Amino acid sequence: QVQLMESGGGSVQSGGSLRLSCGYSHGMACMAWFRQAPGNEREAVAVLYTVGPKTSFADSVKGRFTISQDSAKNTLYLQMNDLKPEDTGIYYCATDWDVKWNTCNIGRPTGEWRYWGQGTQVTVSA
C-alpha cells in the first residue's frame, strides 16, 4: 500500500512563502501536487516526472512554485513563493504506478491518480 503524508502548511500573508513536504512510502516515477479551494474542484498545480527530471505547472503558479524530490529522504517538495490569496486551499500530494513519461504532466486527469495524502491547509491572507 502506497502511503503519502503532507506537512508544512500554514497561514501566511500575501507575498510570503511556504514549503510543503510529502513523505512517501514508495518511490514513483510520477508525482504531483494538487490543491482544492472551498467549493472548487481539486486541481493539479505541479507535476514531476522524476526520471529526467521533467516538471510541469498550472499556469496560475508558473514562475512562483517549484516541485522537487529528495529520494534519499523519500520526500516530495512544493516550494511556493509570492503567495496570493487565491492560492488558499488544501494541498495534496498524489502518485500512481507505471505512469509513462508522456502522460506524467499537468494535464493528467485528477481521477487517474490512485494514491493521495490526507492534505495540508494553506491560507494566504491579503
Image (spheres, grey):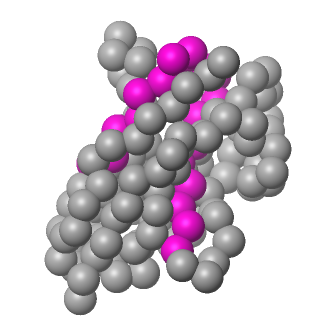
Which picture quadrant has residue 42? bottom right
In the image as oriented, which residue stretches furthest toward the top? 72
The quarter of the image holding the N terminus is top right
Q: Identify the residue at horizontal 45%, vertical 69% (top origin).
A: 89
Residue 103 shows in this picture: yes
Queried whether the magenta region covers residue 30, the answer comes back as yes
Q: Identify the residue at horizontal 52%, vertical 74% (top origin).
A: 37
Percent across and percent down for residue 41 are 68, 71
Side of 68 relative to 58 (left or right):
left
Which picture quadrant has residue 17? bottom left
Task: Relative to 100, say whether 61 is above or below.
Answer: below
The residue lying toward the viewer, choosing from 96 and 62, is 96
The quarter of the image holding the C terminus is bottom left
In the image as oriented, which residue stretches furthest toward the bottom? 126
Q: Identify the residue at horizontal 30%, vertical 55% (top origin).
A: 9
Task: Say how many tags the image has.
Answer: 0
Percent across and percent down for residue 12 are 19, 70
Queried whether the magenta region covers residue 5, the answer comes back as no
Q: Main secondary structure of the magenta part?
A: strand
Side of 120 relative to 24 (left or right):
left
Side of 115 relative to 82 (left or right):
right
Which picture quadrant has residue 101? top right
Percent across and percent down for residue 49 are 61, 31
Instruction: Please provide the residue range marked out in magenta.
Output: 19-37
Residue 52 shows in this picture: no
Percent across and percent down for residue 80 are 32, 57
